Structure formats: C-alpha cells, structure tokens
Amino acid sequence: MYMKTNHLIITLLISFIISFTSMAQNFSSELGLTLGPVAFKSDYGIEGNSETNFGNIGFGIGLMHFINFSYSANGGYTRDTYFNDHFKIRNELLYHTTTLNHFGKFAEKDIRLSAMQGQANVLEVGSLLEWHLFSIRDFDSASQNFSPYVSLGLHYVSYSPEASSDLGPLGQTSTTFDKFISPDPSNPYIDTDGGSTYSIAFSAGTRYRVSDLGDIIIDARWHYYGSDFVDGLDHDTPSNESNDWIFWLNVGYVFYLD
C-alpha cells in the first residue's frame, strides 16, 4: 500500500511540474539561488534534546525558478485578478547533507550509540504554490520593500544515507544498540541502500527589494518525508512514531529574467 501511494504522489508531482513548466512560457520568470543550515530530525539522538537539535545540523543549497503571474513573458501587465497579484509558482531543485550522531543520556551510557554515526544525503525536486500577503505588483514597482509569503507543495526525493560505527560493522549486538537490531532479518531497522520518496514542503519567508533586477529572500522551511529511511534508520520504538523531517533556514537571491 505504501509503495502504491508513493508512486501515485510522485506521478502527480511530475505532472504538476510539466504543467507548470508549460505555464511559465506565458508569464514572466525569476531565477534564484538559496543556501543555509538544515536541522535534520531523524532517528539519531533523542527527540526534543537540545544536543540533538543543535548537533545534527547540516547544510543545503537550492536552485529556484519562479513563475510570476502579474506580468506576461513580454513584460506587460496581465489581467488584474487576486490570483495573479498574490500567487507565484516556485519550482526548485534542492540538495542537503547532514552528518548525524547520537546525543543525550542514552548515548552517554552506551558506547554502541556514541560510536555510531551516519549521514543523510538528499536531493529534492518539486513545486510549491506561493501566496504573498501584499500585492506583488506593488512590490515589483518598488511601492514597498518587503513581500512576506507562505508556500505549500510537494517534492520528489532521492536519498542516499550512510551509517557506520567505530566499533565495527553494524548489525551485530557488540556494535549496534539493541533497538536498531530487527527481529526479522528481512525487515532490517538499518538500511543504507537509498531510495526515493516524496516530501510535503511548507515554507514561510519574505523578500526584500535591493534593486530593479533582484531581491534578497529569507526563507524558513519544513519538509516532512514519506519515508523514515531517509537517514538510513527506522527502529521500532515509541520514540520513532514519525517519519524523518527537516527544518531549513536559508537565505538567497532572486534575479528577474523578464
């Protein structure tokens, strides 16, 4: 059932991207680059633990393409509607990587946890619908300097995790914490083969106009993944009820192409 749902969402996402790309030919476009720290919330460490929250932080970079409905591709105004003046489509290609370690009281007591480390390597591509609080035309005409927004969308996700231990190969009781050893060898709790899934992406931020040709963008993101193996771990405990997710604070620059 999970695989069927996963494939359906990915198919819908690809269809959306194709539709948005075709739509972009009729409207003005913007191109942006963004980067910043990523807090990866995974099966490493303890949920809500400050050492885990600040220790498992990586870095991400992204390329963004915006469809601006307020202006046509030739630079003229489009029809003045609420949608055209308050919404944009954001297509993006993102990559982030995070080194993961176990922190907290359990890692301090058990060397098998403190000796274990991993890495989450994630590539995402997808589209979001971006709603701007104020008029996009007023912002583009420099009537106001800030343009706050929120956005929601879907991403296709390709992940390639890593996991190892200073004590030796994982999977043995001498090197691996008990909770990470599955009673069913066909359903392991540690899987670094990688794979693909989807993410639900939400963001909130603002633009700041710095010139007629570009804006600075400050953006806070939350991505919830359709798989719990993005970090390579999926142990069966009450503390592991949710899938992997990230919080990403990034800063970037957007260029106006049309």
Image: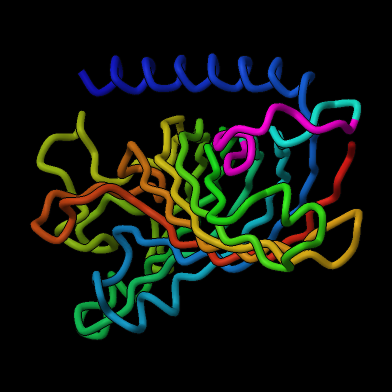
**Can residue 90 be seen in the rendering of this structure?**
no
Residue 218 location in percent, x, y?
64, 66
Residue 163 vertical position relative to residue 158 in the rendered view, above or below: below
Quarter of the image with the C terminus is: top right
Q: Residue at x 13, y 49 (%)?
A: 236
Q: Residue at x 30, y 70 (%)?
A: 45
Q: Residue at x 63, y 51 (%)?
A: 135
Magenta range is 75-88
Residue 118 vertical position relative to residue 160 in the rendered view, above or below: below
Residue 180 location in percent, x, y?
21, 54
Taking the image as shown, residue 177 lies to the left or right of residue 199, namely left
The residue furthest front is 80
Total labels: the figure holds 0
Q: Please state which of residues 182 and 175 is positioned toward the viewer in this rendering.
A: 182
Residue 47 vertical position relative to residue 62 in the rendered view, above or below: below
Q: Is residue 245 magenta?
A: no
Q: Residue at x 50, y 47 (%)?
A: 151
Taking the image as shown, residue 223 lies to the left or right of residue 257, namely left
Taking the image as shown, residue 89 lies to the left or right of residue 30, namely left
Residue 217 location in percent, x, y?
69, 62
The structure's colour scheme is: rainbow
Residue 28 vertical position relative to residue 10 in the rendered view, above or below: below
Q: Please state which of residues 115 and 78 is positioned toward the viewer in this rendering.
A: 78
Residue 94 location in percent, x, y?
63, 45
**Can residue 193 be seen in the rendering of this structure?**
yes
Quarter of the image with the N terminus is: top left
Where residue 226 sits, quadrant-wise, is top left
Q: Is residue 76 magenta?
A: yes
Q: Please state which of residues 199 and 129 is positioned toward the viewer in this rendering.
A: 129
